[in-house]
Amino acid sequence: MATAGMSLLAKAELSELETKYLKDFTDDSRGNAGPGFNPRDTFDEKFHQAVLKSKDEDLQRAFILQQLPSRIASILRELIENRKMTGINVYEPLNEEDRVKLATAFEECMQLLQKLDANQHKYFYKEYRDDFEAANKPKP
C-alpha cells in the first residue's frame, strides 16, 4: 500500500540511462593511487559501492542528481576550452567526433537533471543551455 508521501519515481526501477550514469559516477578507477592509499579515497569507494549495491532507488537517484552538475560543468569546460584531457596536464584539441560525444553526454545529463530534479531549479537549465549554445558555436 502506497503512502501519500511516496514518490512515483521511488517505485520504478532505475531507467537504462540512470543505471548508466550511476555506474559511471560510482566507478572509482579515477587514476589515483587507489583505495587504501588515501583514507578519503577508501571512504569514497566504500560509499560509492554501497550506493551502487543499494536497493534504495531514491538514494541512487539522489546520488546521480548530486553528481550531475559537476559532470555538466566538466562537459561545458571541455567545449569552451575546445580541448580534452588525455593525461596529467596533457590536452588535445577536440575533433568533431569528440564534440558530438560531448553534445550527446550534455543532452543525456540535462535529460536526467530535469527528470530527477522535477524541474525545481529551472534557472540552472537555462544557464546550462546558454553556456552550451555559446560553447557549441562554430569557431572562426
Image (tube, rainbow, N blue to C red):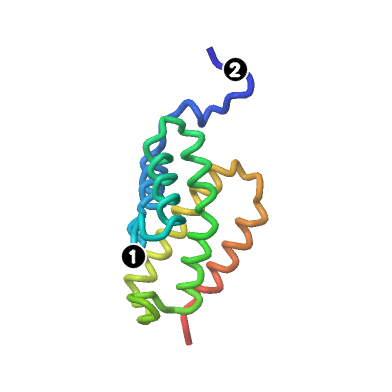
Q: Amino acid at mark 1?
A: Gly
How far, Cα to Cα, is label 2 from label 1? 44 Å
Q: Secondary structure at mark 1?
A: loop
Discs 2/1, front: 1
Q: Nearer the viewer, residue 66 or 45?
A: 45
Which amino acid, by three-letter code, is at mark 2?
Thr
- State the residue position of label 1: 31
Residue at point 63%, 57% (across, down)? 124
Instruction: Please report the residue visible at 46 percent of the width from the left and 66 percent of the height from the top.
Output: 75
Q: Is residue 4 above or below residue 50?
A: above
Q: Residue at x 36, y 60 (%)?
A: 37
Q: Position of residue 5 (x, y in %)?
A: 63, 23
Picture coordinates of residue 140, whole percent (x, y): 48, 87
Picture coordinates of residue 21, whole percent (x, y): 40, 49
Residue under pointer 2: 3
- Where residue 100 sits, quadrant-wise, is bottom left
Which of marks 1 and 2 precedes in the sequence? Answer: 2
Residue 101 to residue 21: above or below: below
Q: Give the quarter of the image for residue 102.
A: bottom left
